[in-house]
Amino acid sequence: MRANKVLNYNSILQVLGEPGCPVCRFMKDVQAAALQKPGSTRVDHLCNFHTWGLAAMQRAPLAADLFLRLLEKEAHVSPDLPCDICVVLWKEEDLRIRELVTCLNHKLVAQWLRSKPILCSIHGEKLKKGAPPVLASTIQAIMERYREQLMEGLEKLRDDYRSDTANWGLLGHAAEFLASQRGLHA
């Protein structure tokens, strides 16, 4: 994990022109902000992924201060508590899924839907649950088209393997499709 430039998106509509799943793109920015910007999220408990992410992405003095606070509390903290950063991500993801569903008739969304859009399977399924039947069908078609594209590329990578890493980005795309961006879902 490495630090990313935090863009502080305000709307899911801002990421529709970016590559990949727009919900993953938006949430990756939210996660980076939570890990990189001190004080943006109150942290009393962290999961494994976000503990390591904070160690890797936060400035050392700020990470040390946070880890000191967590170590002081650790004897009194239940291991069953949810990670504070995960809770922020769950709430924001729900908000952005609902935003995208309510904007499905917006001209930017209509344009995105015509431009070979990509949705990961997790966010696609969540979108389908809130969408009217016709749009749920469109979302399913988007996911199926991308799944087939990934399968074709992965079969070629498997069968025509070369030691160069030119096509290895495909593995990351497949991982995102299957499980969304790293750290967004356990």
Image: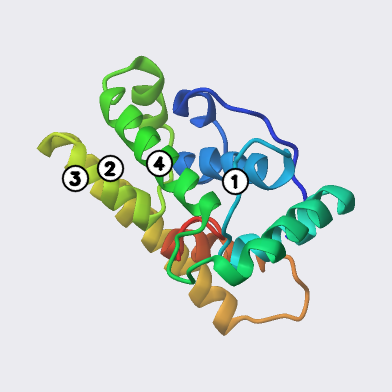
Return the disc, 1 or 2, that comes first in the chain's sequence.
Answer: 1
Q: Residue at x 47, y 39 (%)?
A: 22
Q: Are marks 2 and 3 in contact (CB under 8 Å)?
A: yes
Tag 1: Cα neighbours inside 10 Å, few (<14), some, or many (≥20)?
many
Question: What type is the residue that disc 4 sits on?
Answer: Lys
Q: Secondary structure at mark 1?
A: helix
Q: Is residue 184 above or below residue 89?
A: below
Q: Given the image, on which type of amino acid does mark 3 rest?
A: Lys
The structure residue drawn at horizontal position 48% and vertical position 69%, both measured from the top left corner, is 78
SS at circle 2? helix
> Between tags 1 and 2, which lies in front?
1
The answer to whether mark 1 and mark 4 are in CB contact below 8 A is no
Q: Quadrant of the C terminus?
A: bottom left
Q: Is residue 2 visible?
A: no
The residue to which callout 4 is attached is 91
Q: Secondary structure at mark 3?
A: helix
Q: Earlier in the sequence, mark 1 or mark 4?
A: 1
Gap between marks 1 and 4, in whole Å?
12 Å
Residue 127: give its label: 2
Q: Amino acid at mark 2?
A: Leu
> In the rendered structure, which disc, 3 or 4, sits on the residue that comes first in sequence?
4
Amino acid type assigned to the residue bearing label 1 in the image: Gln
- In the picture of the structure, the residue carrying the numbered disc 1 is 31
Q: How far apart are the alpha carbons under marks 2 and 3?
A: 5 Å
Position of residue 82 measured from the top left corner of the image (x, y, whole percent): 45, 60
Whether residue 46 can be seen here: yes
